[in-house]
Amino acid sequence: MTTSPNRVTLLREGADGRAVHDVGGMDFGPIDRHEHDLALWEKRTDAMLILLCSKKNVFTIDAMRRVIEDYGQQAYDRTTYYEKWIRAIRNLLVEQEIVSPDEVETRMADVAARHRANGRQVSAETIDWAKGGAA
Amino acid sequence: MSGEAVTAQRFRPGQTVHVIERPALGHCRTPWYLRGKTGVVAAVQGAYRDPERLAYHKPGLPSQVLYKVRFLQSELWPDYPGPTSDHLEADIYEGWLESAS
């Protein structure tokens, strides 16, 4: 518990003082109700969150929600459910000084190199994400 | 939660309450569309550490009483097409409620 994050609310544009995430009752068109499979990284993200919150008490689910709510409208609207989660986990581990941004970047570079060596593509956007940069 | 500080319960089931109309400052659990609205306490849900403080790595004490508050849909949404008796229930922490009488 080394840091005390700032208390801020980012507002949604033209929405009468609603916070970015606080969209209850707004019209975003029809909801896609189809079932869909989760990717492996999404399941791992879910497992990581449970371990960090419930088993290790590294941060609370409340802090996780706060970090997601602080993304800003563009990032909030563009990102999927588990993209919000994995980025929140990264940001909270950095905020709590459990890992440093440098450690995350170094590890991401290692993983990216391994993927490229195996002939897989790694998008620049993924790398930006790991750095906590603009989504 | 035995032994932890808890705020005194100010409202009881059946009481009409008003959700305070104030902007959120940081994480809060009271949705925008309920602020400034009037409802009735349907149940007392217990007392929980304050999420508005837990979100910032604080202990969240004293615990806050959480109420299930019932609102008429037709009062929340101006163009609500359903029956006028339709309602919505939401969990609201005591710090966001004031007596409507």
Image (cartoon, grey):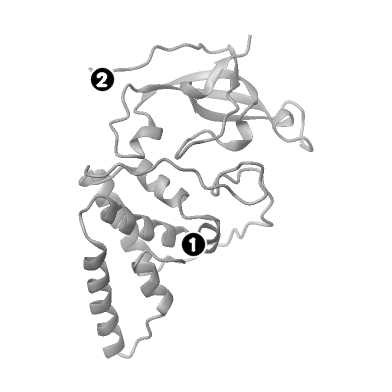
Read off the chain for label 2.
B
Q: Position of residue A64 (x, y in %)?
A: 37, 48
**Does residue A25 appear left or right of residue A82 in this picture?**
right
Q: Which residue is at a point 22% across and 53% down the rendered structure image?
A: A97
Is B94 in front, or is A106? A106
Say which residue label 1 marks: A80
Q: Secondary structure at mark 2?
A: loop
- Residue B38 vs A40, above or below: the answer is above
- Residue B98 vs A70, above or below: the answer is above
Asked if residue B100 shows in the view, the reply is yes
In which image quadrant can residue B80 be found?
A: top right
Give, as a three-letter code, the residue at label 1.
Thr
**Does residue A119 appear left or right of residue A98 in this picture?**
right
Say which residue label 2 marks: B4
Q: Mark 2 and mark 1: span between their CA atoms?
A: 38 Å
- Residue B85 vs A84, above or below: the answer is above
Give, as a three-letter code, the residue at label 2.
Glu
Is B69 in front, or is B10? B10
Read off the chain for label 1.
A
Disc 2 residue crowd, few under 14, some 14–19, many 20+, Cα 10 Å: few
Q: Position of residue B18 (x, y in %)?
A: 61, 19
Marks 2 and 1 share the same chain? no
Q: Secondary structure at mark 1?
A: loop
Q: Position of residue A77 (x, y in %)?
A: 55, 59
Q: Which residue is at a point 27% across and 23% down the rendered structure image?
A: B1
